[in-house]
Amino acid sequence: MMERRSKTAMLLALAAVAVTVSPAATQLSKPPRDPAGISRKLERSAELQRQVLETLANPGQAERIAANAWTQLKSAHDDMYVNNKYAQFPDPLYAGSDQRLTQALASLQIALDTLRAHGQWTDSAHEVERVRSNVQKALRLTNIVAQTSF
């Protein structure tokens, strides 16, 4: 009878530990970001980047679109960082994606800064070409990440 109580008590104690440890052990300190959401942000940024290329005749409009494209890309980049940082098994392709997105963001930022200064342009054709080149580079890099990461 005593052995039976000991075994029962031990099993109850183990069950209590398993119940309390199990959810805590599987829970991350930060919730993972939805990969489908990240993919949508990358696609949205790419679409906005294409719109920038189509609206370069109107620098003010292109500036607003470029700012939105940058914001979408930055959000996707931040989400990918969080997922990689808190993943049990980090993505081996993350380093390449991180580098590409960092370059894409820098290229978009140059294009955006150039567009913001459109009132001071002395050679519009040269500045438009500079913006086009930077947006095309950002778009190429964004597309590579979107295709290889998801």
Image (cartoon, rainbow, N blue to C red):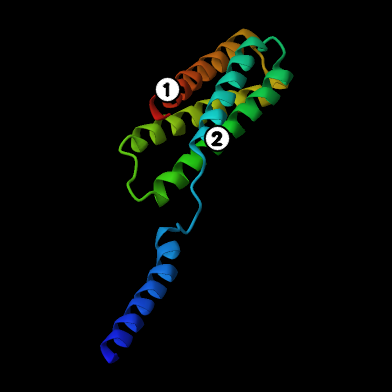
In the image, farthest residue toward the front: 1
Query: Which quadrant holds residue 129?
Result: top right
Residue located beneath label 1 in the image = 147
Instruction: Determine whether, in the image, residue 64 is placed left or right of residue 41.
Output: right
Horizontal and vertical percent for residue 135?
A: 54, 19
143 in relation to 88, above or below: above
Q: CA distance from mark 1 to mark 2?
A: 14 Å
Name which residue type carries label 2. Answer: Gly
N-terminal of the pair, mark 1 or mark 2, is 2
Is 75 or 37 nearer to us in this picture?
Answer: 37
User: Is mark 1 in CB contact (under 8 Å) with mark 2?
Assistant: no
Residue drawn 61% across and 27% down? 69
Residue drawn 29% across and 91% down? 2
Horizontal and vertical percent for residue 134?
A: 51, 19
Horizontal and vertical percent for residue 148?
A: 38, 25
Is 52 or 79 nearer to us in this picture?
Answer: 79
Crowd rating for badge 1 (residues with CA inside 10 Å; few <14, some 14–19, many 20+):
few
Badge 1 element: helix
Is 88 or 71 nearer to us in this picture?
Answer: 88
Residue located beneath label 2 in the image = 37
Is 89 or 45 nearer to us in this picture?
Answer: 89
Instruction: Determine whether, in the image, residue 27 is placed left or right of residue 111.
Output: left
Q: Is residue 6 visible?
A: yes
Name which residue type carries label 1. Answer: Gln
Crowd rating for badge 2 (residues with CA inside 10 Å; few <14, some 14–19, many 20+):
few
Residue drawn 67% across and 17% down? 121
Quadrant showing the N terminus: bottom left
